[in-house]
Image (spheres, rainbow, N blue to C red):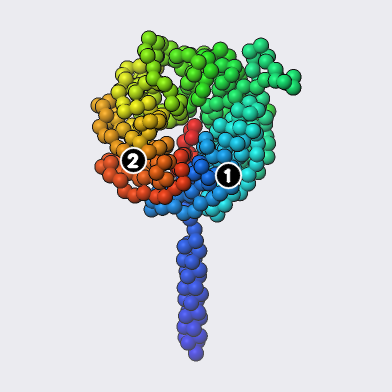
Amino acid sequence: MKNKTNKMIAIASCCIALSGCSLLSGNAQTLRATGDMGVVIERATGQVQIVNHSNNEILAEIDGLGDLSHASIVYSRDQRYAYVFGRDGGLTKIDILKDQIAKRIMQSGNSIGGAISQDGKLVAVSNYTPGGVKVFNAETLELVADIKATTLIGHQKNKDGTIKRSKVVGLVDAPNQRFVFSLFDSDEIWIADFSTPQYRVTKFTDIGRAPYDGLISPDGRYYIAGLFGEDGMALLDLWNIDQGVKRILKDYGKGNKKLPVYKMPHLEGWAMAGDYAYIPAVGLHQVLVIDTKTWLQVDAIKVHGQPVFVMAQPDNRQVWINFAFPNNDTIQVIDTQSQQLTDTLTPGQGVLHMEFTPRGENVWLSVRDEGKIQIYHTQSKKLLKELPSSSPSGIFFTNRAHQIGL
């Protein structure tokens, strides 16, 4: 009798275990990992698509994000939340696991991008109207700081008597809980240090006329601002800020007859590969090659049109380029070892953005005017798949959560 009882208990235990396994299996089917996901901006409709780049599929579409004509995204460090910066001043926090908006605020009249702090606790937004940077709690979107970018040139005033503010561009995160950005109207670069409860701002003036965008090197050391009002660029060594801002490429473009500029290139789309930077030449059909040890130009590679994004694969072996109108149906590829063009692709009209999968086996292209996303194998250059998308522009994968300046 005792043995029979023990056997019954064993059978019951087995059933409970199997039931538990079944429940766990059911739960596992509802889980979604974030490491191979991304968000695609659909600029014309105020929508975004949630995508998966392992299976090359669209998972969901979310609307109600306002003006996305110049939208960008950063991710929380756990990759669950995407913070979308809209042109209308909207800041939207999206839960990409639940496929819904977690919170949305209108924080300004006209914003141009943003960044997330090193510890992931702060989200900063750069604004045109009113000029400045607002910093928010990443969890609640409550305002933490309002940095007013007042101009120093003659203390210009608005009609209401208030001091005129500068448009802020080129906002990036930097190591040691800092944000770095440029002031378009007053020719300055500022560092906002949030490493202590009371933030501090360091200002560099007379850095060059009208900085229009900025980038930070992948290691977080160098901040570079492009200059709209004069030839050259401005470089700040964040390891040695006491040395101030240095002008680089100061003679670039002098004496050359430039073409009309249909679209200013995005500096955050620079490629830094090994000891070289590959940068779009403003108003020329060239990609410039810069030695990052000396910050001197060493080559100029002739390309199909005026380059906009010049982006390196994760292994730095290839650089992919898209172009401004009217040549925006084309992608070209540079081999970084030979510094030669190797491939030309024609995905379709309006190729606005590229995004590599984290290890670089594939690249996703937004083809706005064709209403689709194209996915290519980077080694063979073969088209793998097309996905429908309404006027797609920026493509942002979640691995950006762990990269400086992205």
**What amino acid is found at the position of numbered circle 2 in the picture?**
Pro
- Does 124 sit left or right of 16 as displayed? right
The answer for how far apart the CA atoms under marks 1 and 2 are is 28 Å
Residue appearing at x 48%, y 26% in the figure: 215
Q: Is residue 49 above or below residue 296?
A: below
Q: 279 or 109: which is nearer to us?
A: 109
Q: Earlier in the sequence, mark 1 or mark 2?
A: 1
Q: Is residue 69 above or below residue 246?
A: below
Quarter occupied by residue 362: top left
> Mark on residue 358?
none
Residue appearing at x 68%, y 40% in the figure: 142
Q: Position of residue 380 (x, y in %)?
A: 26, 42
Residue appearing at x 61%, y 39% in the figure: 90
> Mark on residue 347?
2
Q: Position of residue 374 (x, y in %)?
A: 36, 45
Q: Position of residue 300 (x, y in %)?
A: 32, 20
The residue wearing badge 1 is 65
